[in-house]
């Protein structure tokens, strides 16, 4: 009977038995949600940086005619980052956010580039928190950027 009591009093192996359960809970509750936030933040910041870099690349080569910039736009879109494609560029004249025409493209009016890209998130755990877009794909977000060039 003396040997049986010594085994009950000796519980040194209980930590080794409990550790996998504690590790699994920490992984699911803390580390995976943090990984989701980190990946979403990285994609968002990368897309904004790509939009800004694209704006800087086209800033010093404005279109020769803001009312008909289709040939210039196709050449400018070739400079975009392939990871974050930009489908089109809109040229805006004045502060009323109107597309440039011959009526509103005077030299006194400010002129802007406006373009956008789309990012898609793929969260592991935080799908209900991060995927809140109202577009067709709830995890897809459109980021718009605008920059003045004249």
Image: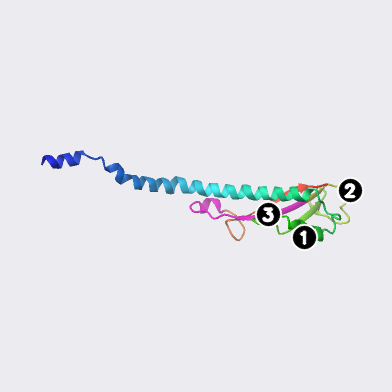
Q: Residue at x 43, y 47 (%)?
A: 27
Could you classify mark 2 by the number of other residues whose Cα lies within 10 Å: few (under 14), some (14-19), or many (20 or more)? few
| Chain part drawn in magenta | 113-131
Against 85, residue 28 (above or below) is above
x then y, percent, for residue 22:
36, 45
Helix, strand or loop status at disc 2: loop
Q: Residue at x 55, y 51 (%)?
A: 130
Q: Quadrant of the N terminus?
A: top left
Residue 81 numbered mark, or none: 3
x then y, percent, for residue 46:
63, 49
- Kindly indicate the quadrant of the structure image that contains residue 76: bottom right
Residue 8 numbered mark, or none: none
- Kindly indicate the quadrant of the structure image that contains residue 121: bottom right
Helix, strand or loop status at disc 3: loop
Looking at the image, do the residues carrying marks 3 and 2 touch, with CB atoms under 8 Å apart? no
Could you classify mark 3 by the number of other residues whose Cα lies within 10 Å: few (under 14), some (14-19), or many (20 or more)? some
Separation (CA) of disc 2 from disc 1? 24 Å
Q: For the image shown, how many numbered marks are present on the structure?
A: 3
Q: Is residue 110 left or right of residue 33?
A: right
Separation (CA) of disc 3 from disc 1? 14 Å
Q: Is residue 134 left or right of residue 96?
A: left
- Pick whichever of labels 3 and 2 is earlier in the sequence: 3
The residue that mark 1 highlights is 74
x then y, percent, for residue 56:
75, 47
| In front: label 2 or label 1 | 1
Query: Does the magenta-highlighted stretch encompass residue 58?
Result: no
Residue 107 numbered mark, or none: 2
x then y, percent, for residue 36:
52, 49
Could you classify mark 1 by the number of other residues whose Cα lies within 10 Å: few (under 14), some (14-19), or many (20 or more)? few
Helix, strand or loop status at disc 1: helix
């Amino acid at each position: 009977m003396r040997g049986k009591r010594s085994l009950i009093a000796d519980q040194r192996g209980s930590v080794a038995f409990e550790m996998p359960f504690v590790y699994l809970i920490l992984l699911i509750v803390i580390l995976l949600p943090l990984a989701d936030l980190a990946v979403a933040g990285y994609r968002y910041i990368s897309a904004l940086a790509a939009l800004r870099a694209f704006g800087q690349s086209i800033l010093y080569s404005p279109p020769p005619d803001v009312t008909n910039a289709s040939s210039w736009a196709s050449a400018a879109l070739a400079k975009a980052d392939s990871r974050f494609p930009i489908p089109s560029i809109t040229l805006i004249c004045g502060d009323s956010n109107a597309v440039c025409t011959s009526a509103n493209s005077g030299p006194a009016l400010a002129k802007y580039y406006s373009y956008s890209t789309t990012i898609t998130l793929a969260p592991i755990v935080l799908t209900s928190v991060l995927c809140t877009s109202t577009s067709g794909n709830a995890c897809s977000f459109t980021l718009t950027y605008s920059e003045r060039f004249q």
